[in-house]
Image (cartoon, grey):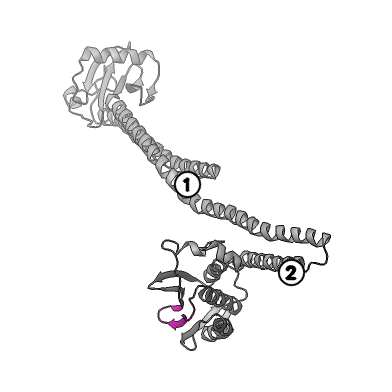
Amino acid sequence: MKKLKIQIFLLVFMMLTVVTSSTLFAYNFQTYSQEKKSVERSLNKTMMGSFESFEFPQNNRGFPGNSDDFDNIRFMDSTVYTVILNSDNTPSLIINHSDSSITNDEIKEVVNKLIAQNKSYCIGNLYTNKYSYKYVEQDYITVVDNSSTNELLYNTLMITLLIFVLLEVLFVLISKNIANRIARPVEKSFNQQKQFIADASHELKTPLAVIMASADALESNSTEKKWLENIKSESDRMNKLIADLLELAKSDFVNDKSQFSVGNLSKTVEKSILTFEGVMFENGVLLSDEIEENIELNMSEAKIQQLISILLDNAVKHSETGGTVEVKLKKDKDIVLTVTNQGEGIPEGEEEKIFERFYRADESRNRNENRYGLGLAIAKNICKSHNAKISAKSGDGKTTFTVVFKV
């Protein structure tokens, strides 16, 4: 079970991590692309907007005759400089297109370093490259200061990494919670299965021990009939247990509705009650019924009869002498069947447990009566297959089992 929880945890955690990391990566990639386009736009706008609409003097190819107009060009998204070069590629005229406090000497030093790289166009890594530029030999070089871009991209990256770390911590908690929730019913079923095997083994061991002991005694003394009676009694007891186990196993297939058909539930309940009149008379229990006529239900009639038999048998066994078993069936919004008996009630807090396999409130009495605590578990499965819910409640000396069939 621990391994299952770990596998579920890792699966959920990896899915959340992949989605989150992909989203944050896409955001950083988009931000980087936008900044790169901004740098490209700054370089291109400077060249196109600066040199095409001015008269150029003959001694300076490609340079505007009026540098004052050139100085008025501003690019708010970047710090941009255009440096006009002499024939020996030394800076001749520096045009600052942005509000910047950098001196001309500093700009010349930067330009000389960029020219030394011998590249005509370079944007570079905007996380680390401080400058991007467009260089035309013996003509001009346009430089974009990437400082603000570097800072923006770095801050974005750090923030997204911080968000990623915080989300990973949150995902650990979420994944653990989801793993526990998913594994809980599996764990419950696994524990019930272990308990079921343990209880079944215990129940089968006792009659088998009696049978084996009686057989040994019979072998040594064939005149004693009591050993045969013991064998028959314990064989019957084990046969009933095995029959109940098989019935419970079959009733676990709650989705099998091949035997279902629309039938008269009222008549089915009445028929089931009639078969118990003799049993109730022998146990000194009275019967009271209130059955609404012609209530129809898509059902397995045999399973419904078995359900009624289980509830009536349980009611009779737990009724006090002279008590009354009341059976009611009515249809309102849903179809409601109730079976009530007077006598010993269900211990407080055990109302749900009585539907578990092998549950018995009184071990000694039930064992003597060959009752194994499987009947109500079978009844619950029958209800489930009919889209119904069964519940029990005790109070004021009465115990009521309620079955609600959803219409």
Q: Which residues are magenta?
A: 320-338
Residue at x-position 79% and y-position 67%: 224
The residue pinned by badge 1 equals: 179
Indicate the position of residue 5 as horizontal and vertical percent values: 51, 44
The Cα–Cα distance between marks 2 and 1, rounded to whole angstroms, is 54 Å
Say whether marks 2 and 1 touch (CB < 8 Å): no
Type of residue at label 1?
Answer: Ala
Mark with earlier residue (2, 1): 1
Indicate the position of residue 17 as horizontal and vertical percent values: 44, 40
The residue pinned by badge 2 equals: 229
Q: Main secondary structure of the magenta part?
A: strand
Q: In which quadrant will I find the N terminus?
A: top right
Indicate the position of residue 198 as horizontal and vertical percent values: 61, 53
Image quadrant assignment for residue 374: bottom right
Crowding near the residue tagged with mark 2, few <14, some 14–19, many ≥20 C-alpha atoms within 10 Å: few
Question: Helix, strand or loop at disc 2?
Answer: helix
